[in-house]
Amino acid sequence: MAKTGVLSADPTVRARAAELKKELQRLVRTIVDDEDYSIQTIDQAKDALCGLRELKFNKRSTAATTTSSLKLHEALSCPEEFRCPLSKELMRDPVILASGQTYDRPFIQKWLNAGNRTCPRTQQVLSYTVLTPNHLIREMISQWCKSQGIELPNPVQYGKEEGITEAERDHFFSLLDKLSATLPEQKAAAKELRFLTKKMPSFRALFGESVDAIPQLLAPLSGSKSQSGVHPDLQEDVITTLLNLSIHDSNKKLVAETPMVIPILIEALRSGTIETRSNAAAALFTLSALDSNKALIGKSGALKPLIDLLDEGHPLAMKDVASAIFNLCIIHENKARAVRDGAVRVILKKIMDGVHVDELLAILAMLSTHQRAVEEMGELGAVPCLLCIARESTCERNKENCIAILHTVCLNDRTKWKALREEESTHGTISKLAQDGTSRAKRKANAILERLRRSVNITHTA
């Protein structure tokens, strides 16, 4: 029998849990059944698990109020004006939306966090999404509850349950205002916002409550065409805050579609401290979790500065840059942009130098579906390098990526078969992969061996 409780009582939460489970089931099936699954698939599965864990945690953390919640559900005869238009239940924390309509805070907050910017009841477009407590309705509900013998949680307790209080909300908006003040005030406000958005997920969510919050955050960087004149500490704190709030799933679309965000991140890739540049790359990686954002970021010209930063090779930035390029190149149009911007040459050079071989081989394998990339790999001497890694690496994924790339390159250029034949004759590298590699590596290795055998037979026949 299914257990009852807060999770099952809230239809919104229950629907979200079912959605996460369905998505997790699909992702796990892809990972188990498909040898060509991507790192992004693993990350998405991890995000789905984290989402379920958060729902479960919230269920436990609200267990103390379960009894009073059940009493609220039993209050079927309450006046209609005391019910939330979304939940159809007695409101615990009534708040006023910009449209003038009153809702229970958790339900309207979920509506807004999902990216909606209209009033659910009137469909009016909201000029802002700050929620104002409706003290009059709250007091009327409180009086009615007393007359019915029902205990109603107070708003302060509920605010803490959600992770944010009205005082903290006011402080958040005061910090945003200071970002348009004097330089010392800007620096202090940016540093505190960086700290708060790192430590408190609720502060990340606050950026989705006002259409002006992100532009206000970026005000210190958007006053001039170049960020080179901005104080480096201020730039680093603003860019890192942008990274922090982009981690919040409900913010990803909002952040990327705010007109000045992507250009400012691209400019930050080129200037500022190495921490700023690295965090700008990390922000682009985080935002690119959404396919719509991948296309938007690619069209904005982010791949060229990412590839340039990769070429510079600073150890602190390499991982974030490689992750961003990998994520962006999942969609085909960005592969073409990456190839055009010189990705193949830069990546091959780093692999030959033994730098972040695992991550860069994964990108190279992804680019090998693009014709011009394959041609460049052949021209730039990729075959000997890939054969060496396939022979000497202890990483099965690296061997798999190498043999997959080799298969594509050699199909494209017959002159490369000689190198494969010599490798097989001297070291038996391809036969070993055909026998002991991953299932994908076995397929590619066997296909190469078959081609080698056919070429020998053709030669003998001739």
Image (cartoon, grey):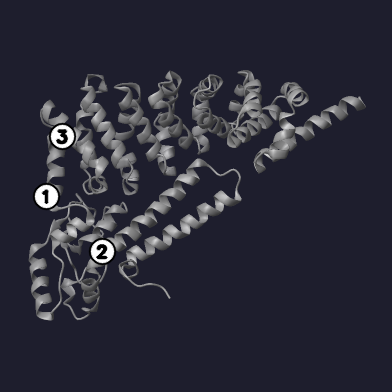
Q: Nearer the viewer, mark 3 or mark 2?
A: 2
Cα separation between marks 1 and 3: 16 Å
Q: Residues within 10 Å of mark 1 (few under 14, many from 20)?
A: few
Give the residue at x 50% y 46%: 41
Q: Amino acid at mark 2?
A: Thr
User: Residue 62 bears which disc, if any?
Assistant: 2
Q: Earlier in the sequence, mark 3 or mark 2?
A: 2
**Residue 7 drawn at (x, y percent):** 33, 66
In the image, 335 versus 315, the foreground residue is: 315
Q: Is the residue under label 2 in contact with that under label 3 (CB below 8 Å)?
A: no
Vertical comparison of 309 with 151: above or below: above
Q: Earlier in the sequence, mark 1 or mark 3?
A: 1
Q: Amino acid at mark 1?
A: Ala
User: Residue 28 bears which disc, if any?
Assistant: none
Q: Is the residue under label 2 in contact with that under label 1 (CB below 8 Å)?
A: no
Tag 2's secondary structure? loop
On the rendered image, what quadrant is the N terminus found in? bottom left
**Residue 224 drawn at (x, y percent):** 22, 24
Q: Is residue 222 visible?
A: no
In the image, 410 versus 126, the foreground residue is: 410
**Residue 217 drawn at (x, y percent):** 21, 36
Labels in figure, total:
3
User: Residue 167 bears which disc, if any?
Assistant: 1
Residue highlighted by disc 3: 189
Name which quarter of the figure residue 323 lies in: top left
Q: Amino acid at mark 3?
A: Ala
Name which quarter of the figure residue 204 lies in: top left
Q: Is residue 62 visible?
A: yes
